[in-house]
Amino acid sequence: MALVLLALGAAWALWRSDLPRASLLAIPLLFGASWWQLQRMRWRELVLRGDGSAVLADAGGELHEASVSGLQDRGLLQVLRLTRAGRTVVLVFGFDTLDAARRRELRLWTERHLRRDATPGVAAHV
């Protein structure tokens, strides 16, 4: 639903702008590409285990092993990078998709289980 509202907002903004009306043709292309990408994501749940492993569970209940490669805090957003079957998956969590307690759990889990490479000349965060 949010994707449809975003597309409608983009159409209204393009209509009101000084861009040529032909630019409205880009909206169905972008909408279709976004919808296709959403449908490719077959997993529905991320499970972070206490032993440091991560699993993606699909709609059918099948589990797929994944490894967490990084977590970044960007203001109100948290960006989690996973690697599954040689491909990188990026998950973006906002304040509306992950409550404060879950954000804290995610941050603490990654601090405990994620190996951080020491960069020369930079002090490690303790």
Image (tube, rainbow, N blue to C red):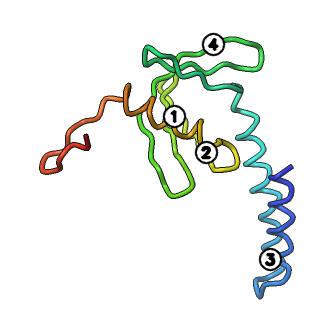
Q: Secondary structure at mark 3?
A: helix
The disc placed on residue 106 is 1
Q: CA distance from mark 3 to mark 4?
A: 43 Å
Residue on which disc 3 sits = 14
Mark 4 residue type: Leu
Asked whether 94 or 64 is in front, the reply is: 94
Q: Nearer the viewer, mark 4 or mark 2?
A: 2
Tell me what residue is drawn at x 74 percent, y 56 percent: 30
Q: Residues within 10 Å of mark 2 (few under 14, many from 20)?
A: some
Which numbered disc flags the more N-terminal residue, 3 or 1?
3
Q: Badge 4 is on which residue?
A: 63
- In the picture, the disc for residue 93 is 2
* Relative side of 16 to 48, left or right: right
Q: Label 2 sits on what residue type? A: Phe
- Give the residue type at disc 3: Leu
Image quadrant assignment for residue 45: top right
